[in-house]
Amino acid sequence: MAKPRIKVPKKAAAGDVIKIKALVSHTMESGQRKDKEGNVIPRKIINKFVCSFNGSTVFSCDIDPAVSANPYLEFRAKVMESGTFTFQWTDDDSSVIEAEKSIEVA
């Protein structure tokens, strides 16, 4: 199973724009390579990423097969209240990798 690693500040002031870093361990198999026996290795890539804060989407993107293994994303979000960021990576087979990080806003 893929393992997400997330960096979100633990605290911020209301109205701060914070930097968020998200990385997930994933092979991102394109479906164009072959194994030792000459069989095509099935395509298995993450094709969608969504970050939500307290239920509202703050960042999302589609991911193409050309993205390398272990995709890394960095983006910024403005926080006005304490809450939880929810991160979701969706794979070709519709499986979803999820992670959460909380932030305290003073």
Image (cartoon, rainbow, N blue to C red):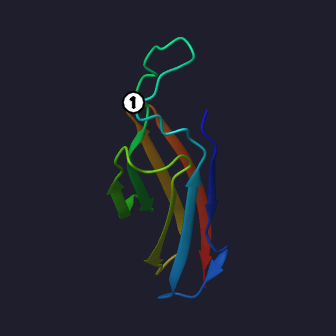
Query: Is 12 placed above or below 39 here?
Result: below
What crowding class fits label 1: few (fewer than 14 Cα within 10 Å), some (14-19), or many (20 or more)?
A: few
Q: Quadrant of the C terminus?
A: bottom right
105 on left or right of 33: right
Q: Percent from the top left, x then y, of residue 69?
A: 53, 46
Q: Percent from the top left, x then y, of residue 83?
A: 54, 67
Q: Secondary structure at mark 1?
A: loop
Query: Is 9 placed above or below 5 here?
Result: below
41 on left or right of 6: left
Q: Residue at x 48, y 14 (%)?
A: 38
Q: Percent from the top left, x then y, of residue 102?
A: 61, 64
- Nearest the viewer among 26 and 80 is 26
Based on the displayed image, in which of its 4 quarters is residue 45 positioned? top left
Q: Residue at x 47, y 34 (%)?
A: 29
- Nearest the viewer among 39 and 72 is 39
Q: Quadrant of the N terminus?
A: top right
- Nearest the viewer among 72 and 54 is 72
Based on the displayed image, in which of its 4 quarters is residue 37 positioned? top right
Query: Is 5 placed above or below 69 here?
Result: below
Amino acid at dot 1: Gln
Q: Percent from the top left, x then y, of residue 79?
A: 48, 79
Q: Residue at x 54, y 77 (%)?
A: 19
Q: Which residue is mark 1?
A: 32
Q: Is residue 82 in sight in this rendering?
A: no
- Nearest the viewer among 49 and 58 is 49
Q: Is residue 31 in sight in this rendering?
A: yes
As drawn, the residue found furthest toward the top would be 37
